[in-house]
Amino acid sequence: MLNDIVNHAHPIFVHFPIVLITLGMLYDLVVSIRRRALPLKQGIWIWLAAVLSAWLSVATGPEDDARGNTSFLELHSTLADITAWVVSILVAARLFMLFRGKTSLIRFSLVAYLAVAVASCALVLGTGYYGGKMVYDNGIGVKVEGTPVNPPKGHHD
């Protein structure tokens, strides 16, 4: 059972950054609209969890399963890397401002921050879209009774 969990780590982890980045963006948008400012401490735990889950998803991506069997791997992988970096930079900037004594984002800094948060959400949704295309259109990582539907090229069991 543990081996199955390890072998399926990527499909388990990938749902977390999708949910957490979307939730973090929506939370920040609602708070910002209601207050016309974004308190930097509010919602930071959502974004910290989003960063961790994004990098876990990137690290567990089973690229060998997809090589040669799909045209979506490179785009999916690139979007995943960009997503993880953008969310990392967003969180690092927010933490930096907190440590420098800033309590809230307002005006231009708020608009710039929200633009990056919205972009990170678009990136993670695009990443998920192409990951889904690999699974549902190309059968990458799908097995029937233990046999891969679309085994990696040059792979022998």
Image (cartoon, grey):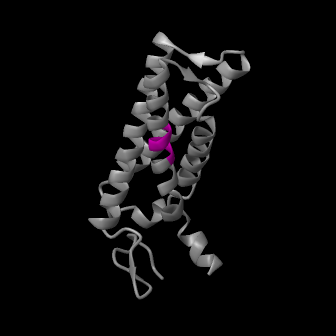
Left or right of 120, for residue 85: right
Residue 70, how many percent across, how many down? 31, 60
Residue 149, how many percent across, how many down? 34, 78
Q: Residue at x 49, y 21 (%)?
A: 35
Closer to the camera in the image, 121 or 39? 39
All told, the count of numbered labels is 0
Q: Residue at x 38, y 52 (%)?
A: 128
Q: Residue at x 64, y 77 (%)?
A: 2
Where, quadrant-wise, is the N terminus in this rendering? bottom right
Q: Quadrant of residue 102?
A: top right
Q: Quadrant of residue 34?
A: top left
Closer to the camera in the image, 152 or 136? 136
Q: Is residue 81 visible?
A: no
Closer to the camera in the image, 75 or 123? 123
Residue 130, how many percent across, how many down? 33, 53
| Residue found at the very far bottom of the displayed protein | 145
* Extent of the magenta region: 20-24
Left or right of 8, for residue 120: left
Residue 30, how many percent across, how many down? 44, 31
Residue 21 included in the magenta stretch of the image? yes
| Residue found at the very far front of the displayed protein | 34
The answer to whether residue 90 is above or below residue 82 is above
The answer to whether residue 41 is above or below residue 75 is above
The answer to whether residue 14 is above or below residue 5 is above
| Residue found at the very far top of the displayed protein | 107
Q: Is residue 80 visible?
A: yes
Left or right of 73, for residue 55: right
Q: Main secondary structure of the magenta part?
A: helix
Residue 128 included in the magenta stretch of the image? no
The answer to whether residue 45 is above or below residue 32 is below
